[in-house]
Structure formats: C-alpha cells, structure tokens
Image (spheres, rainbow, N blue to C red):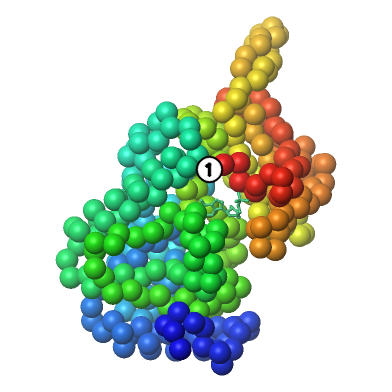
Amino acid sequence: MSDNKRPENMARINTPALGDAFIAEQVEALKKQIGDKKVLLALSGGVDSSVVAALLIKAIGKNLVCVHVNHGLLRKGEPEQVIKVFGEELGATLIYVDAVDRFLDKLAGVSDPETKRKIIGKEFIDVFAEEAKKLEGIEFLAQGTIYPDILESVGVKAHHNVGGLPEDLNFELVEPVKFLYKDEVRVVGKQLGLPDSMVYRQPFPGPGLGVRCVGAITRDRLEALREADAIVREEIGKLPETPWQYFCAIPDIQSTGIRYIDGQGQRYMGWAVVIRAVNTVDAVTATVPEIPFSVLCKMRDRIVKIPGVNRVLWDISEKPVATIEWE
Ligand code: XMP
C-alpha cells in the first residue's frame, strides 16, 4: 500500500464518537512519531491547519510552533481569531508575523491575476522560510494536507494553493489528517473544541482577498472589500440555509454617485461592490441560489455606508460560463 492511499478498512468519521477515537489514536501516533522534538506549522486559521494545530497541541503541547502569516489579504477578524483561539485559549506557541506591508508593497501596481497569485505564493514561502530559519531545533514540518489534496494533486487546490512550503528546509513531514475528507476534518475539529466559525468556514482561496480585489490592489479598495465581505458573511450567514460560498468582489472600476452636502447634490466617483453567492458540489460547476430581496437590500444599505463605495451589484452568473472567483 502506498503511503498516500487511504487504508481500505478505515471507517468514515461521521459521528462525534468516531471523531474522538480518531483524535485519541492520532495523538498517540504523533507522540510516538515526534517524541520530544519540535514541529513547525504554518497556521492560516483555515479548518485543515487549525485541526492539525489542535491535534498537535494535544500531543506535544509547546513543542508545536505555529507561524501565522498575516499577508493583509485575510478576512475581517481572522488574524485576531487565530491569536485568540490558539495563542490565548489553547496556549500554543504562536509566532504572529505582520507581513501586510511587505505583501501589499510587492503587489502594488500588479494587475495580472496569475502574477498576483505568484507574488502572493512566493512571498508566503519566503516569509515562512525566514521565520523557520530563525528557530532552533525544529525537525518536523506539519501540514494540513487532506485526502482530496492527494487525490487531486493536479487539481484545483494544489494548483491554486498558496501554502506550498519551502523545499530547502529539510524537515520530516507530519500530516495527521491526510486521509480525511473535509467533512471528517470538520467532525474532528468540532470534537477538538474549535469554534464553529473555524470548523464550518466556507472555502477561502489561498491568495485570499487578493483574487477578489480585482486588478491592481490598493489599500483603500482592499479595506472596502474586507468590510463588505464581513457584512455579506454576516447577513447571508443568518439565512436558514446558507449557500456553499458567499462573498464579495470589488472590481477596479468607479462609477458616478451622488451625495448631498448642505442640501446640495454633488456627483462623485465611487466603487461598485459585487455580491457573489454560489452553490456547488465540487466547485467545477456552480449555480446561483435565490437570496431574498430583503436580504439583498439590507446588505446594500450597509455596504453603501463603507467609505468610497456607492454601488452594489449582485452577480447572478453561473459556472460555467463565469468562474466562482472574479480572478
Ligand atoms: P473558481 O474561481 O476557479 O473557484 O471557480 C473554484 C473554487 O476554488 C476556490 N479557489 C481557490 N482556492 N486558491 C485556493 O485555495 C486559489 O487560488 C483559488 N482560486 C479559487 C474558489 O474559492 C472556489 O471555491
């Protein structure tokens, strides 16, 4: 059997009890594999890396060193949540790297989507490698690889992901959830006590808001996007059935708006925010769910209060012809 094939007799982890059993088994296996050595993990706050972190904290405690790179393209509140959950509540050894300026400076003026992705990916590896080189006595590198990543190693995630890690660091790999499907990772995460907002997070591209701040990223447009995205996640998140993915994009266009100052109408140029919500099984095709008009209006009323925004659009394009993301 290859190292990367899920054992045929492995039960589907679909109940809390099976989640607990997996945790107990993995914690023992991790203790055995790692002993008293140190492990490094790039912790994005996504469900996969968070579950790996929580498992390793149970197994080896402070000998897990988590590095959270804030590249400035995360959603509102994400770096804070990583610090709160892992740094404060779970007591992890957490290195927080504020790399916002570094990423945004590198991205300034770059409008080609593939070039943007490459810059973000390369910069991430560089920042992580720099942090790793500052540390002493690390022998292992943990990764949140899951089974679909192995199965689709030439597919969407592997192609898109930013989380490729430095090859020259020469660590032994620790991949405790590599045979799990996403739903199983969520069961395990829930049993590990991670917050629902982490465990049931919607998919989020590695280059983050970078692929939704269309064209050359500017800080003010990025901030407007981050605020709008938080509003859309909050309002659509209240629906009894939430779509598979819902977020905002902000194209690099401005259109005319009007504002009243001392009763005088003034025309000015502002950005248009696009609301996107899709349902899909495998992200290969996607449909657009109905969103109640009252919810759309509520989001509109909140989004147009964001500085610089004067228009809200609803993207009803299906995949194909459109992709889910705007870039
Ligand atoms: P598209 O836009 O190709 O997206 O229809 C399909 C799914 O993949 C996600 N996506 C990404 N995920 N890195 C990722 O990890 C990326 O660069 C990336 N681009 C798109 C997208 O959010 C959707 O769920």
Residue at x 55% of width, y 58% of height: 156
Residue at x 23% of width, y 73% of height: 139
Q: How many marks?
A: 1
Q: Which of these two is toward me, 264 or 222? A: 222
Q: Is residue 285 visible?
A: yes
Extreme left residue here? 136
Q: Does ligand 1 reach within 8 Å of label 1's beta carbon?
A: yes
Q: Which of these two is toward me, 232 or 129? A: 129
Amino acid type at image mark 1: Val
Q: Is residue 176 left or right of residue 279?
A: left
Place residue 284 in its image quadrant: bottom right
Q: Is residue 305 visible?
A: no
Q: Which of these two is toward me, 178 or 101? A: 178
Q: Is residue 130 left or right of residue 118?
A: left
Relative to 307, is 142 above or below?
A: below
- The 10 Å Cα crowd at callout 1, few under 14, some 14 to 19, many 20 or more, is many
Residue at x 19% of width, y 58% of height: 134
Place residue 57 in its image quadrant: bottom left
Q: Position of residue 173 (x, y in %)?
A: 33, 74
Q: Position of residue 288 (x, y in %)?
A: 76, 50
Q: Is residue 206 left or right of residue 251?
A: left
Q: Position of residue 188 (x, y in %)?
A: 53, 77
Q: Quadrant of the C terminus?
A: top right
Relative to 172, is 106 above or below?
A: above
Relative to 233, is 42 above or below?
A: below
Q: Position of residue 150 (x, y in %)?
A: 49, 71
- Which residue lies under the disc numbered 1? 211
Residue at x 29% of width, y 62% of height: 167
Which element is circle 1 on? helix
Q: Is residue 210 left or right of residue 37?
A: right
